[in-house]
Image: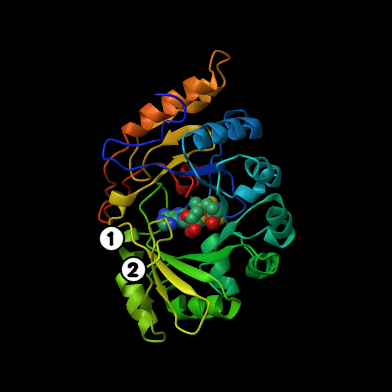
Amino acid sequence: MNSSTPLIDAFGRKVTYLRLSVTDRCDFRCVYCMSEQMQFLPRSQVLSLEEMQTIAAVFVGLGVTKIRLTGGEPLVRKDCVSLVRGLSELEGLKEITLTTNGNQLAQLAKPLKEAGLGRINISLDSLNPEKFHAITRTGQLSQVLAGIDAAVDAGFDGTKLNAVIMKGRNDDEIIALAEYAVSKGVDITYIEEMPLGEGINHDRRESFMSSDEVRSRLRERFRLQAAFENSGGPARYYRIPDTQTRVGFISPHSCNFCHACNRVRLTAEGKLLLCLGNENAIDLKKLLRDPETTPQILADTIRNAVYYKPERHIFNVDEQVSIVRFMNMTGG
Ligand code: SAM
Ligand code: SF4
């Protein structure tokens, strides 16, 4: 096998998609993602831009065609635009995407587009300033809405909103969020809350709302037509006729998408996670920082690790915490 042999696991799934967590830090503290008092990694433990670039080049050499930058909040890292620019020079990489809370997009949307960013996902859980502030604990809705406008103006290949729906917190805004997406001509995905992290200050058994329930609510207002195109991700999509908007549902509890999983995650501290819902990981930072390590050694290590990608994740809302990692550590 040489470094160009593709990444295939023991179940025959080909890995072509890397989610790269640029930082574990964030300017928000969303209630479903972080506790109020978070301990972040010391900077020396976080991969440098050059290390991320090296690892990304190895993954692309192994057949990865799509990289999503995520976090924590990727845009709190000042050098994120240069990272996008560096990645855009990798031959074989077809798509660079970003998931952001939108807080800094008013300034950064245009530079990101110019650096080569293709698509963007922006989290938006509420259109009510007080509720938005309560969910994010620090966020200002007006700033994020300005960021969404800047993304629309920048003209990305795709702009999508992500909303985590929680009963009693924002389930009364399901329709308003879709109407907002339609008014901006962007897509929207509703995400079931996942049991990641500990010290989260609400009972997930009470807040959990299934994609089926969200879909029923939407059907009170919109006609949803099943869309057959594949987004390459775990979402199931519907079209709202006579609009630009597609509505997606990510349902880790009610719909198991593992059989088609094509992705792995790299945490900000260089741990390669083979599955969002399992703890197994390998430490690529240690290898990267060893002067004896060549790109071939990195490639062989990654290929061997991917072979052991778990068959499926198991999330259970009745267990308050399945996975101790927080979502910001994981790279959501
Ligand atoms: N900070 C960026 C953002 O919020 O978009 C990127 C990182 S965030 C961890 C990525 C996505 O994960 C966001 O859409 C967020 O809503 C979602 N997320 C975080 N914690 C979650 C949880 N426990 N269950 C489901 N989705 C979650
Ligand atoms: Fe930050 Fe994103 Fe987590 Fe919210 S979901 S706390 S914005 S990393």
* Residue named by callout 2: 211
Q: State whether residue 53 is above or below residue 99.
A: above
* Category of crowding for the residue at label 2, using alpha-carbon neighbours closer than 10 angstroms: few (below 14), some (14–19), many (at least 20): many
The residue type indicated by label 2 comes to Ser
Question: What x and y, as percent, mark residue 327?
Answer: 45, 48
With 292 as the anchor, is 232 left or right in this view? left
Q: In the image, which is nearer the foreground, mark 2 or mark 1?
A: 1
Q: Residue at x 32, y 79 (%)?
A: 216
Mark 2 vs 1, N-terminal side: 2
Of residues 41 and 182, which is closer to you in this image? Answer: 182
Of residues 47 and 261, which is closer to you in this image? Answer: 261
The answer to whether mark 2 and mark 1 are in CB contact below 8 A is yes
With 4 as the anchor, is 110 left or right in this view? right
Of residues 42 and 91, which is closer to you in this image? Answer: 91
Colouring scheme, one of rainbow, by chain, secondary structure, one colour:
rainbow
* Residue named by callout 1: 255
Asked whether the viewer can see residue 320, the reply is no
